Image: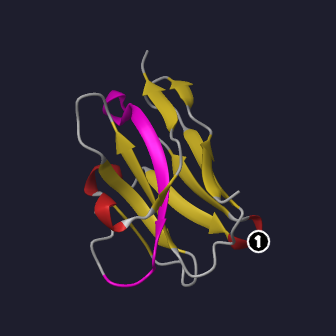
Amino acid sequence: QVQLVESGGGLVQPGGSLRLSCVASGFGLGYLAIGWFRQAPGKEREGVAYITTNTGRSDYAEFVKGRFTISRDNAASTVYLQMNNLKPEDTAVYYCATRHPYGSNWFDAETYTRWGQGTQVTVSS
């Protein structure tokens, strides 16, 4: 079965850390871009970070720069999102998604074609 499965979410206090995983099953990462997105209640889905699996090119949304790190393990078909210094405004459902690794609009959810089911991250004291 071809799918993306996220894990690693949970409840954490402000200033804490979590590491999310996105495992691709039924297909290899190959030449893809993997993006992490999030959606908070009542808000639109927004791009957080992306990485290309062939070159390792990556970038981050301004609101997570310096706090989040995206990485990949192609052999394990897994992409990670290390989230440090978490803030209450980081509370959301986090999704990973895939698209081709070329072009632009890396944070545009419409350019991604396969999505995981999401994992809840809650930052609260």
Estimate how packed mark 1 is, as few (under 14), some (14 to 19) or many (20 or more) residues with alpha carbons within 10 Å: few
Which residue ends up furthest to the left in the rendered image?
43
Q: Nearer the viewer, residue 38 or 66?
A: 38
The answer to whether one can see residue 107 in this image is no
Q: Residue at x 30, y 62 (%)?
A: 110
Residue 6 on the magenta span: no
Q: Nearer the viewer, residue 55 or 119?
A: 119
Quarter placement of the C terminus = top left
Q: Residue at x 53, y 76 (%)?
A: 32
The percent position of residue 10, horizontal first and vertical second, equals 56, 28
Q: Mark 1 — residue? A: 75
Question: In the displayed structure, would residue 15 be above or below residue 27?
Answer: above
Which residue ends up furthest to the top in the rendered image?
125
Q: Which residues are magenta?
A: 85-103
Which residue ends up furthest to the right in the rendered image?
75
Mark 1 belongs to which amino acid?
Ala
Question: In the displayed structure, would residue 41 be above or below residue 36?
Answer: above
Quarter placement of the N terminus = bottom right
